[in-house]
């Protein structure tokens, strides 16, 4: 599975997805790309988009995209805020369908 971490997600979250190809928005060279164009690009190369942006699903029509979405709720963007959610994040990424949003945390 190919997973893209939004630039607002701590890069250390890559470790939550063993056995999967994970990249950050910065690694793809898409940093500072607006959400709409970013998601269009992402659906061509990735299966899942992970973000902490809770407003994304209200601002974009995610159901039309060939990409699953995992929205993480954490108290801060420090990696320690994510650690207890690693198993849930991996499970969500493995089970999300295109156009679906799964909330974790």
Image (spheres, rainbow, N blue to C red):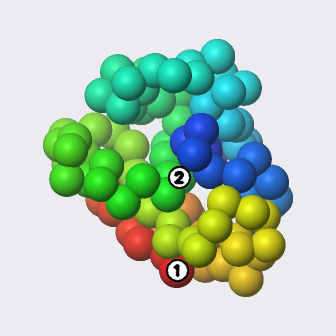
* Residue under label 1: 105
Q: Which residue is drawn at 57% across and 72% down?
A: 74
Please tell me whether residue 99 is drawn above or below residue 89 in the rendered image. above
Within-10-Å neighbours for mark 2: few <14, some 14–19, many 20+: many
Marks 1/2 in contact by CB < 8 Å: the verdict is: no
Location of residue 49 with respect to 76 vertically, above or below: above
**Residue at mark 1 to residue at mark 2: CA–CA distance:** 13 Å
Residue at 31% of width from left, 49% of height from top? 56
Q: Is mark 1 on a helix, strand or loop?
A: loop
Q: Is residue 74 left or right of residue 81?
A: left
Q: Is residue 42 above or below residue 37?
A: below
Nearest the camera: 88 or 79? Answer: 79
| Residue 34: % across, % down | 38, 24
Query: Which one is nearer the viewer's eye here, 62 or 105?
Result: 105
The residue labelled by disc 2 is 50
Residue in the picture at 51% in, 22% down: 32
Mark sitting on residue 33? none
Expressed as whole percent of the image width and height from the top left, the position of residue 87 reads 69, 78
């Amino acid at each position: 599975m190919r997973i893209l971490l939004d630039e607002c997600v701590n890069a250390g979250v890559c470790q939550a997805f063993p056995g999967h190809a994970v990249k950050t928005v910065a690694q793809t060279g898409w940093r500072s790309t607006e959400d709409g164009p970013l998601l269009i690009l992402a659906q061509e190369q990735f299966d899942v988009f992970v973000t902490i942006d809770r407003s994304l699903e209200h601002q974009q029509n995610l159901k039309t995209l060939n990409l699953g979405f995992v929205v993480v709720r954490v108290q801060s963007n420090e990696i320690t805020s994510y650690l207890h959610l690693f198993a849930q994040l991996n499970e969500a990424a493995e089970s999300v369908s295109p156009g679906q949003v799964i909330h974790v945390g």
